[in-house]
Image (cartoon, rainbow, N blue to C red):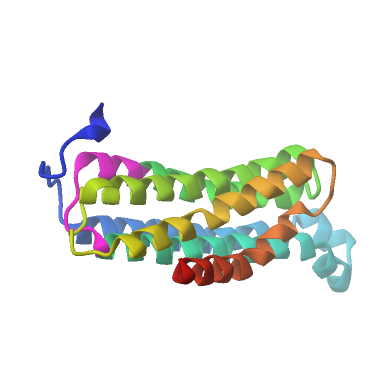
Amino acid sequence: MIFNKPAETKNVLMGKNRLESLTDGIFAFAMTLLVTSLILPRSAIVTQTSGAALASLLPDFFHYIIAFFVLAAFWMGHHEQLSKVHHLDKNLLFLNVVGLFFVTLVPFSTSFIGDYANDVIATVVFELNLLILGLIFTIQWYYATRNYRLVSKEYPESAIRRRMNHQFVIPAISLVGIIITILGFDNSTMVYMASPLVAYAVDRYAKKT
């Protein structure tokens, strides 16, 4: 298997700074592009008052906030991950590229759920996008730290577990949201509002164990 190479094998493709630059650029572009989901159609401008038009954008604005801050959390987590990695290999580079692909899909899934608020398919697409993105970043961390493959052996095991636990927060919340949606409840994306509290609880639990 390609992921079972020994920890001593070093296949350095590029410096971390190049991957960080690419990642920063894609995250910045995706987070900026999110705001396009708030653009009013020409028909709404002609037929609605400014107050009514603004009110019609509230669901879109809510999903924009969720997507923006979730992407910001992923970006910060990715920065934290790479700061602990001492070199890149082709597997980690591939996982990063796949992760960035799903980052670029977030503006689409956000716009999609904004256009079809409370629609089951649109909601699942949005939540599945975030779930897959979170799982890919989790797999990246698992791959890099498994048997200290790409991180220093001096890095504490407890810190590795704590980071892994944090990586599961958004995927777990997304899974809950998908289940709520399938069960027929509206506004399932409200579960993302609990992510800071869940992350705090996970961190407190990790410090006690």
> Which percent across, then down, holds residue 169?
55, 57
80 relative to 195 in the view: left or right: left
Residue at horizontal 27 percent and vertical 49 percent from the top: 144
Q: Count all numbered tags in the image, as a single digit.
A: 0
Q: Is residue 23 left or right of residue 39?
A: left
Looking at the picture, how far across and down is residue 37, in whole percent? 65, 57
Q: Magenta span has 164?
A: no
For residue 52, side relative to residue 102 (left or right) = right
Magenta highlight on residue 88: yes
- The residue lying toward the viewer, choosing from 201 and 74, is 201
- The quadrant of the rendering that contains the N terminus is top left
Magenta part of the chain: 84-97
Comparing 92 with 50, the one in front is: 92
Any part of residue 112 in sight: no
Which residue is outermost to the front? 209
Residue 106 lies, in percent from the top left, at: 55, 50
